[in-house]
């Protein structure tokens, strides 16, 4: 599907994540805003991968800004690890900030419910649902209309 010149391209839906378009124009500021929004739900950033810089350095490929944030909520991660020690293979929750072809910015969230259903452990499922709810609140925060202070 092609977007019109005045309409931002929408990211494709995937079974393992959910997305939102954000109105930010400055990529670095958008990454900082996403990081701050994640903090409101108890997530810190364990890893940050600059995919654009890596592809340039390793392959000589010029790409659009693309950052992978490895987000972790320590109490929830601890619960999941206690329930199933090898669940660390599926952690942390990745959040992607990327630039689309029309220069708009998109935030993608790994869907922990989809990813963690690879296990049948009911405690892991409970944690996955709680993480999902928190990430949905982060998404809502990022897409909420900006308020102006008077």
Image (cartoon, rainbow, N blue to C red):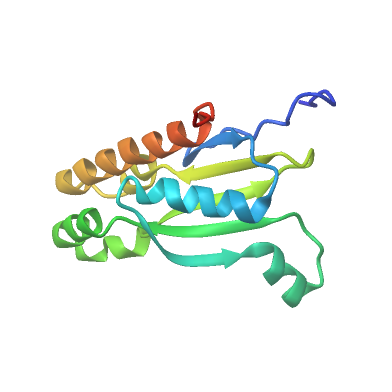
| 30 or 51, nearer to the observer | 30
Asked whether, in this view, residue 80 is left or right of residue 47, the answer is: left
Residue 44, quarter of picture: bottom left
Residue 30 x, y percent position in the rendering = 59, 48
Relative to 59, say whether 104 is above or below.
Answer: above
Residue 139 x, y percent position in the rendering = 46, 36
Asked whether, in this view, residue 58 is left or right of residue 89, the answer is: right
Residue 14, quarter of picture: top right
Relative to 59, say whether 132 is above or below.
Answer: above
Identity of the residue furthest to the bottom in this view = 58
Identity of the residue furthest to the right in this view = 5
Residue 26 x, y percent position in the rendering = 69, 49
For the point 73% across and 31% down, the residue is: 9
Residue 13, quarter of picture: top right
Identity of the residue furthest to the front in this view = 150
For the point 20% across and 65% down, the residue is: 85
The N terminus: image quadrant:
top right
Total marks placed: 0
| 110 or 31, nearer to the observer | 31
Residue 89 x, y percent position in the rendering = 35, 64
Asked whether, in this view, residue 68 is left or right of residue 136, the answer is: right
For the point 43% across and 45% down, the residue is: 37
Asked whether, in this view, residue 21 is left or right of residue 70, the answer is: right
For the point 25% across and 60% down, the residue is: 74
């Amino acid at each position: 599907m092609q977007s019109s010149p005045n309409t931002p391209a929408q990211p494709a839906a995937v079974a393992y994540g959910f997305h939102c378009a954000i109105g930010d124009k400055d990529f670095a500021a958008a990454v900082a805003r996403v990081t701050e929004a994640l903090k409101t739900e108890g997530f810190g950033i364990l890893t940050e991968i600059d995919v654009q810089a890596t592809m340039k350095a390793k392959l000589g490929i010029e790409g659009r800004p693309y950052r992978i944030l490895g987000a972790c909520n320590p109490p929830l991660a601890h619960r999941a690890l206690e329930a199933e020690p090898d669940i660390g293979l599926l952690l942390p929750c990745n959040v992607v900030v990327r630039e689309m072809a029309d220069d708009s910015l998109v935030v993608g969230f790994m869907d922990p419910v989809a990813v963690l259903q690879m296990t049948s452990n009911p405690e892991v499922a409970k944690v996955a649902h709680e993480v999902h709810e928190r990430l949905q609140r982060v998404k809502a925060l990022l897409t909420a209309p900006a308020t102006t202070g008077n």
